[in-house]
Image (cartoon, grey):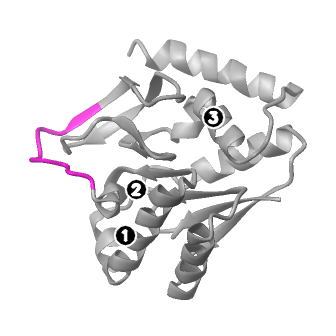
Amino acid sequence: MKTIFTLFPEMLNLNGDSANSFVLQKNFEWMGEQAQTVSVATESQLLELLRLVKSSETGIFVTIGHGSAAAMQALAAHDALIRDLLEAIIESKTPAIVVGSALKWANVNAGSKSDRRSEFVVATSSAEDWPSNALGYLNSDLELPPVSVESNAILTLLHGPFFAKNPSWVERVVRLMGAENSSSESKEVADGFVEEIWRLEANH
């Protein structure tokens, strides 16, 4: 059983980023693999997830989506624990995706804020063994790369959700979680939609 943990899905879902977990789960199901999505929304659940990550548990993935300013303020009491979790994710090479405002917990250097960019972009990535580009909607004033990879954690400013528009990144995660990619009729239909989305948005 593959387990996809989603942190505070009701609060860290401003641009539908929690749906990255759903997309990943559906890809496993299309392959005939059992997968479940588990909400992490209390301190005790955070501590249990931290324990699993530190033990280098295999077959798990963590989604941390983008939240509004109010949501981030409401979660401030968990800041230290979420930072510890992300540090453990990076050290253990646990696959994860961290989106938008959640990057503050990843100890990235955002530099000074710039004018807000609100546009569809095809961002490049130089991360070894990962896809070289990604499509998404950039709506941020942070001075950060739209997508990068730290260990096996995808750090991105792109919404979409990210996995829905970038199946090659999903395929990389699937391999990291110990499964072999395989095709199915459902996946082929989904990939057809993705091709059309790229055609429309990549040249927007």
Please provide the residue range marked out in magenta. Answer: 108-118
Residue 59 drawn at (x, y percent): 72, 56
Residue under the image location 40 percent in, 56 percent down: 66
Residue 94 drawn at (x, y percent): 57, 55
The residue indicated by pointer 2 is 66
| The quadrant where residue 139 appears | top left
Verify whether residue 111 appears in magenta: yes
The residue indicated by pointer 1 is 83
Of pointers 1 and 3, the one earlier in the residue sequence: 1
| Disc 1 residue type (three-letter) | Arg
Residue under the image location 58 percent in, 67 percent down: 53
Do the CB atoms of the residues marked 1 and 3 lie less than 8 Å apart? no
| Disc 3 residue type (three-letter) | Arg
At numbered mark 3, what does the secondary structure look like: helix, strand or loop?
helix
- Give whichever of 204, 129 is nearer the camera: 129
Of pointers 2 and 3, the one earlier in the residue sequence: 2
In the rendered view of the protein, which quadrant contains the N terminus?
bottom right
